[in-house]
């Protein structure tokens, strides 16, 4: 009898965590490494949010909370959905989790049976297929193209849906491509979903507040209220409020699903940390001034990185609408010989040669299901980004 569960054979470790680990190891050996692998803002959590956590500790808010979250946070979430997305949810239709990650995991855990399919557009956030597989479902990938700015077409979505499809996972702005769907682009997808009444929508709106220029964020139920009874709208404070370490994510949806997720969470973590929940109340109800300030900084960095990457020989980089990632193609480097003498055959070869030769850590596109590309997280200083892009340009010029 094997000691480890069969489920483990269905999952792979996170490529993004592996890249960060490799960069740390090289740094520890004294190499000058610029890590562009991490998916978290480099800003500090705003002071008003930190203070709310300190106040919660001092008030003694240090005990177990209700499994689905403290009432104050669930109210704040319902108000946020009304204020920012014009969605009507009661507090009872919301749930707080230990990061958006737990919300997604528990939604799959609560609903997937063997044979159930989950449609996931590629490139995708690395955790979706692994979570689906761990919960016994089957991920079904639908590729997008760089020509279409990594956005799924209505025809391709329609073709991917079968009688076994349980969920469609939607993520805009996207990790890893930064692509965000306008209201009209999303409407084309929700029209398809309206034809398939057995398909539920899991929308991961984690990067809602990180869109640039005059782009306007849209979420499926806002665009198509007819999907209200079969959509879980997920979001969180990690990216918008620079709170990745606080581990608070949340969602709203049909009561039956929320109750099922509550049941799982009750046997799992008993709910998120009390102190972090009070901090999240302040994040959602307090001053939102932090968000536009950060957006402006991120937009400047995005423009810098896109422009410098497009000057690198063999690289082409579209300008994404949101998040803090770019997803350039390295197709022009495939078949070339790196300075080490190794022929670059895949995007994975490209990123490992780049790391060895120039000390720049990025993540290969095949880890996100679409290549030959690579992901750069520009959540770091302009100075470092400029230096990293100069090194990428030098590396590309040196490949013959
Ligand atoms: C698309 C996407 N969804 C969800 C998450 C999870 O966020 P959290 O920190 O709230 O677990 C991330 C984090 O990288 C993400 O990129």
Image (cartoon, rainbow, N blue to C red):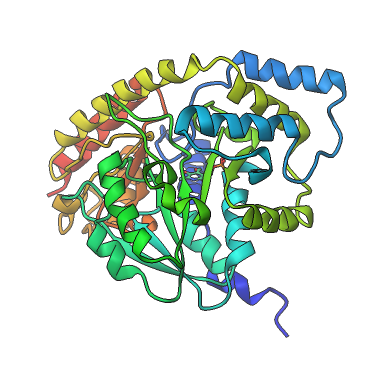
Residue nearest the viewer, comparing 284 with 248 = 284
Residue 260 percent location from the top left of the image: 68, 59
Give the side of residue 28 with respect to residue 320, left or right: right
Q: Is residue 25 above or below residue 157?
A: above
Residue nearest the viewer, comparing 336 with 174 = 174
Give the side of residue 266 with respect to residue 248, left or right: right
Residue 229 percent location from the top left of the image: 52, 54
Say whether residue 261 is visible. Answer: yes
Q: Is residue 133 above or below residue 101?
A: below
Q: Quadrant of the N terminus?
A: bottom right
Say whether residue 179 is visible. Answer: no
Give the side of residue 256 with respect to residue 155, left or right: right
Residue 267 percent location from the top left of the image: 79, 57
| Residue at (42, 15) in percent of width and height | 293
Q: Residue furthest bottom?
A: 1
Residue nearest the viewer, comparing 32 with 377 = 377
Q: Is residue 164 above or below residue 95?
A: below
Give the side of residue 309 with respect to residue 122, left or right: left
| Residue at (20, 40) in percent of width and height | 317
Residue 10 percent location from the top left of the image: 54, 71
| Residue at (49, 14) in percent of width and height | 289
| Residue at (76, 55) in percent of width and height | 268
Q: Residue furthest front?
A: 226
Total marks shown come to 0
């Amino acid at each position: 009898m094997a000691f480890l569960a069969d489920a483990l054979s269905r999952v792979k470790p996170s490529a993004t965590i592996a890249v960060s680990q490799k960069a740390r190891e090289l740094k520890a050996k004294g190499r000058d490494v610029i890590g562009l692998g991490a998916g978290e803002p480099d800003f500090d959590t705003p002071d008003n949010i930190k203070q709310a956590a300190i106040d919660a500790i001092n008030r003694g808010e240090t005990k177990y909370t209700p499994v689905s979250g403290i009432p104050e946070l669930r109210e704040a979430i319902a108000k946020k959905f009304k204020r920012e997305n014009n969605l009507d949810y009661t507090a009872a239709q919301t749930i707080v989790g230990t990061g958006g990650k737990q919300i997604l995991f528990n939604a799959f855990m609560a609903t997937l049976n063997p044979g159930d399919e989950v449609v996931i557009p590629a490139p995708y956030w690395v955790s979706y297929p692994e979570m689906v597989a761990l919960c016994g479902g089957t991920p079904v990938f639908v590729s997008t193209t760089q020509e279409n700015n990594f956005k799924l077409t209505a025809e391709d979505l329609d073709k991917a849906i079968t009688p076994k499809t349980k969920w469609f996972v939607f993520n805009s702005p996207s990790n890893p491509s930064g692509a965000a769907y306008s209201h009209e682009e999303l409407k084309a997808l929700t029209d398809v979903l309206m034809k398939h009444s057995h398909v539920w929508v899991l929308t991961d709106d984690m990067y809602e507040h990180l869109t640039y220029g005059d782009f306007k964020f849209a979420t499926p139920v806002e665009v198509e209220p007819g999907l209200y009874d079969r959509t879980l709208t997920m979001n969180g404070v990690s990216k918008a409020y620079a709170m990745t370490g606080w581990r608070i994510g949340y969602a709203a949806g049909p009561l039956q699903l929320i109750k099922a997720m509550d049941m799982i969470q009750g046997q799992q973590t008993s709910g998120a940390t009390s102190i972090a929940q009070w901090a999240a109340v302040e994040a959602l109800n307090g001053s939102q001034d932090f968000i536009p300030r950060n957006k402006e900084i991120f937009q400047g960095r995005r423009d810098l990185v896109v422009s410098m990457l497009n000057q690198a020989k063999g690289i082409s980089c579209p300008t994404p609408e949101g998040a803090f990632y770019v997803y350039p193609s390295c197709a022009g480097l495939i078949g070339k010989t790196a300075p080490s003498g190794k022929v670059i055959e895949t995007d994975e070869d490209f990123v490992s040669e780049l790391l060895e030769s120039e000390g720049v850590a990025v993540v290969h596109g095949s880890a996100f299901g679409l290549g030959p590309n690579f992901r750069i997280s520009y959540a770091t200083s302009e100075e470092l980004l400029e230096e990293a892009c100069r090194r990428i340009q030098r590396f590309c010029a040196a490949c013959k």
